[in-house]
Image (cartoon, rainbow, N blue to C red):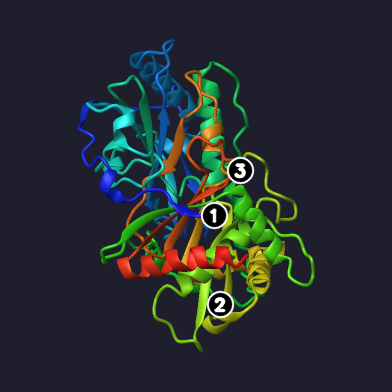
Amino acid sequence: MGTSCLKSASLLHDLKVTIHKTSTIFPSKEMENKSLFLTNIDRVVNFDVDTLHFFAANKAFSFQKVAEKLKKALEDALVHYSFLAGRLRQNPETKRLEIDCNAKGAEFVVASSKHKLTEIGDLAYPNPAYAQLVHKSKDLPLCAVQLTSFDCGGFAMGFTTSHVAFDGLSFKTFLDNLAALAANKPLAVIPCHDRHLLAARSPPRVTFPNPELIELDQSPTGIESSVFDASKEEVDFRILKLTSKDILSLKEKAKGSTNASNTGFNVITAHIWRCKALSAPYDPAGSSTILFAVDIRSKLNPPLPEGFAGNAVITAFASAKYEELEKGEFSRLVEMVKEGAERMSDEYVRSVIDRGELGDGFPRGDVLVSSWWRLGFEKVEYPWGKPKYCCPLVHHRKDIILLFPPFGAGGDDGINIIVALPTKEMEKFESLFHMFLRSV
């Protein structure tokens, strides 16, 4: 059943990266200066997301050729995503955060590592040295791309994008379009930039209680809840794997007396919730809250356009007493997670957005499950091939647990779960993880 894949002892801690060239790139056509409205969902995710995309060597594409094609494709992409060449600012009249589409440009970096990809270790492990594969700029662009070659001929694309610009699904669409442009093909999906589709109603109407939300800071940058803050404690990383057979077993147990069917995500999230909640000292009479993102594109009436190029996820939640997490039926925990997702009706979503207009709106909980499992970054077909593996740059955040497709499995053979916890909590988490699986 689930097993730990790797610990940090076998990691390469210095990738010996040299930066050769840093340049600012601009849209390949002259663009109109304008401002882009940001929703209440956008403004609470004002932080950068770093993603890494590893590629094997391709004899038909030298590193120089890849760099030229990628840079040209990015310049063309900035025509269709002009906001990526802009900068965040506070609107002087409304005092809201917005994007000034001023064509100041994105950044493009060419670099090299003295190591081979095989020397880095397991690509799936969250190696802190991966920070050398992304570019951080004092100019605060909304998009920066670093292309790093390895001694074996393989290379990595490291993207730093503001979460204000994209959620996971809209970033996947951006990558599909970038790959199409690199291949001199039409866009895979026409992007929709009308974020007013998720604007608050006037006047705002809050029709649901939201115990999972806390008050938003009124500053243009918003706040980051403690669930998103890097931990000041020393933490251990583990990758725990659930095979397809494990997930099927969890689904069977989750049927309970109702014989209801459940998604893989719901049973995995319930399993993680129970392990995380019980891994630290707790009051049995107290409660634990788990958070997880739900895509709202299809929840709205009418649904959002396929190419919606902003943030269209709302944080769902489930809460339970610790005593129930420890002794209750697993099927009931799964049902709570399912109810959290099903809560997301059109009116519920609109109410959450309206609440953000009144000053409340940032999610809080004991643990956030962030799923990269089915985003499909590894399926993007570039002229030089599909990535070997894709992952975010992982930070020391003990209350965020990440779900990934396993390396080399094409996303179909089980799932990798990345956990960061203090040593004693990690030991308890692992023990519970295996114990609850054995009881399935």
- Nearer the camera: disc 3 or disc 1: 1
Relative to 29, residue 391 above or below: below
In the picture, the disc for residue 308 is: 3
Q: Judge whether residue 357 can be spotted in this image.
A: no
Question: Counting residues from the N terminus, which is met first, the one under dot 3 or under dot 2?
Answer: 3
Screen quadrant of the N terminus: bottom right
Screen quadrant of the C terminus: bottom right
Task: Look at label 1 and name its amino acid.
Answer: Met
- At mark 2, the secondary structure is helix
Query: Residue 296: where, in percent of width, then height?
Result: 64, 55
In the picture, the disc for residue 1 is: 1
The residue carrying mark 2 is 325
Question: Counting residues from the N terminus, which is met first, the one under dot 3 or under dot 1?
Answer: 1
Density class for disc 1 (Cα within 10 Å; few <14, some 14-19, many ≥20) is some
Q: Judge whether residue 131 can be spotted in this image.
A: yes
Query: Residue 86: where, in percent of width, then height?
Result: 40, 39
Density class for disc 2 (Cα within 10 Å; few <14, some 14-19, many ≥20) is many
Task: Look at label 3 and name its amino acid.
Answer: Phe
Query: Residue 32: where, in percent of width, then height?
Result: 47, 32
Spatial CA distance of label 3 from label 1 is 39 Å
Instruction: Tell me which residue sits at (54%, 30%) in the image.
Output: 380
Instruction: Tell me which residue sits at (42%, 60%) in the image.
Output: 95
Question: Counting residues from the N terminus, which is met first, the one under dot 1 or under dot 2?
Answer: 1
Q: Pointer 1 and pointer 2: residues touching (CB < 8 Å)? A: no
- At mark 3, the secondary structure is loop
In the picture, the disc for residue 309 is: none
Instruction: Tell me which residue sits at (22%, 42%) in the image.
Output: 13
Task: Give left or right: position of 24 versus 339.
Answer: left
Which quadrant of the view contains residue 233? bottom left
